[in-house]
Amino acid sequence: MGIPNDSVTQNEIEEKRRQEAAEELREEQRRKAEKSLDRALEDSFPASDPPSVTQPPPSVYDKRPKR
């Protein structure tokens, strides 16, 4: 039998922690998006147009300096 390599085991543990942290981050971002959409739906009720997840790009008039 060989001697277990502690560095490999430690690297595997660290990689698993990084993966779990990334999954938690993605889940938190998903929850934020869901909450934002729910809030937009509540604020727009009753309306004929559903809320948009994205915002339109700035127009030419938005870029002009205000006087």
Image: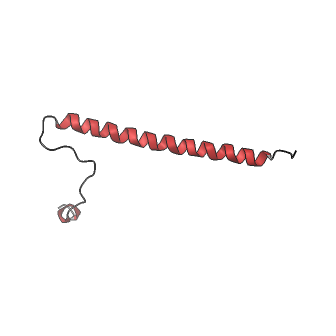
Q: Position of residue 25 (x, y in %)?
A: 48, 43
Farthest residue, direction right: 1
Farthest residue, direction front: 1
Q: Position of residue 45 (x, y in %)?
A: 16, 35
Q: Is residue 15 left or right of residue 58?
A: right
User: Quadrant location of residue 48?
Assistant: top left
User: At 20% from the left edge and 60% from the top edge, which residue is drawn?
Assistant: 62
Q: Is residue 18 left or right of residue 49?
A: right
Camera-side residue of 29 and 62: 29
Q: Is residue 62 left or right of residue 28?
A: left
User: At 79% from the left edge and 45% from the top edge, which residue is drawn?
Assistant: 6
Q: Is residue 11 left or right of residue 45?
A: right
User: Quadrant location of residue 21?
Assistant: top right
- Quarter of the image where the N terminus is located: top right
Colour setting: secondary structure
| 22 over 60 or under it: above or below | above
| 36 over 11 or under it: above or below | above
User: At 41% from the left edge and 43% from the top edge, which residue is drawn?
Assistant: 29
Give the mark count.
0
User: Quadrant location of residue 43?
Assistant: top left
- Quarter of the image where the C terminus is located: bottom left
| 42 over 54 or under it: above or below | above
User: At 33% from the left edge and 36% from the top edge, which residue is drawn?
Assistant: 35
Q: Position of residue 58 (x, y in %)?
A: 23, 60
Camera-side residue of 44 and 3: 3
Camera-side residue of 65 and 46: 46
